[in-house]
Image (cartoon, rainbow, N blue to C red):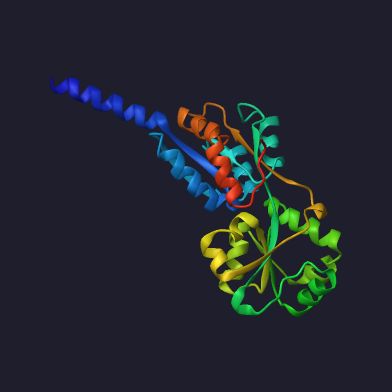
């Protein structure tokens, strides 16, 4: 009889292992995904390990064999690169479209305005501007594109302070390490950030749409596949809309 319970325990353990999944999530999604995961977990018995960071770093790690099962990226470039290199089940799908914002602490007294001349005046007065590294962080790349299109690149380039991802760039402003910074609307709308920061949504016509794609890796477990499907549900889309993303109908 004791062997029966031992075998049963081993089977249950195997099921738990089989259901576990490691999910790489772009930093701009942290607050939104926390809510999405909570909604997902309420109806699913799964063991998800979630890691936040820059899409570029995740893609490089996956190429080098990192055991991620699902990449929820901040752009299309990195997921499609993984697909072309045979790392994923397919090309995945776009789950959201993001927006960049300029942020400043409310206590700083810095006025954020979309008027080009006022914006240039603000940039001339500040000492440090936070931005995510454009080569690995899609929101940083969009911010770079925006600055060049708006004609403020020369004014800002020597004041830039680079972070590994958009969440860290936001923290630079929050901590006072930078006077202002480029962030994601999704982060600016989070309760903690909104309490202490002002934000300005930047002209979306001045940078390429930030189409955020997710992809499943080959041999992804059932829990990763279930989350992938849930990310496309009306419930998940409602949360994404709440945080300022656009979603496909």
The answer to which of 232 and 81 lies nearer the viewer is 232
Q: Nearer the viewer, residue 138 or 226?
A: 226
Position of residue 89 in the picture relative to residue 131 (left or right): left
The residue nearer to you, when weighing 244 against 143, is: 244
Residue under the point 75% across and 47% down: 209
The residue sitting at 71% across, 75% down in the picture is 111
Q: Quadrant of residue 185?
A: bottom right
Count of numbered badges drawn on the protein: 0
Q: Quadrant of the N terminus?
A: top left
Residue 197 locus on image (x, y percent): 60, 69
Q: Nearer the viewer, residue 50 or 247?
A: 247
Q: Quadrant of residue 84?
A: top right
Task: Give coordinates of residue 72: x percent, y percent.
Answer: 59, 41
Is 45 situated above or below 201?
A: above
Q: Is residue 13 left or right of residue 160?
A: left
Horizontal side of 65 relative to 125 (left or right) equals: left
Instruction: Give me the residue at 49% from left, 31% from top.
Output: 226
Outermost residue on the left side: it is 1
Quarter holding residue 118 = bottom right
Q: Give residue 200's position: percent from left, percent from top.
A: 70, 64
Q: Residue placed at 64% from the left, 31% from the top?
A: 92
- Measured as percent of width and height from the top left, residue 228 is found at 54, 33
Q: Is residue 170 positioned above or below 44 on the image? A: below
Relative to residue 237, is residue 182 drawn left or right?
right
Which quadrant of the rendered structure holds the C terminus? top right
Residue 198 drawn above or below residue 124: above
């Amino acid at each position: 009889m004791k062997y029966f319970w031992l075998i049963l325990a081993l089977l249950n353990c195997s099921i738990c292992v089989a259901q576990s999944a490691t999910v790489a999530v772009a930093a701009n999604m942290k607050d939104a995904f926390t809510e999405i995961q909570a909604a997902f977990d309420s109806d699913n018995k799964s063991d998800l390990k979630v890691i936040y960071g820059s899409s570029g770093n995740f893609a490089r790690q996956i190429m080098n064999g990192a055991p991620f099962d699902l990449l929820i990226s901040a752009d299309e470039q990195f997921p499609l690169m993984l697909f072309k290199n045979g790392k994923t089940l397919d090309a995945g799908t776009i789950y959201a479209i993001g927006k960049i914002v300029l942020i400043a602490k409310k206590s700083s007294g810095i006025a954020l305005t979309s008027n080009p001349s006022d914006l240039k005046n603000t940039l001339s007065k500040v000492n440090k501007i936070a931005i995510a590294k454009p080569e690995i962080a899609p929101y940083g790349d969009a911010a770079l594109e925006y600055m060049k299109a708006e004609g403020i690149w020369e004014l800002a380039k020597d004041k830039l302070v680079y972070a590994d991802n958009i969440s860290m760039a936001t923290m630079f402003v929050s901590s006072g390490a930078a006077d202002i910074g480029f962030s994601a609307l999704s982060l600016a709308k989070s309760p903690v950030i909104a309490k202490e920061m002002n934000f300005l949504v930047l002209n979306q016509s001045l940078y390429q749409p930030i189409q955020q794609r997710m992809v499943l890796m080959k041999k992804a477990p059932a829990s990763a596949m279930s989350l992938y499907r849930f990310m496309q549900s009306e419930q998940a889309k409602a949360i994404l809309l709440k945080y300022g993303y656009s979603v496909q109908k």
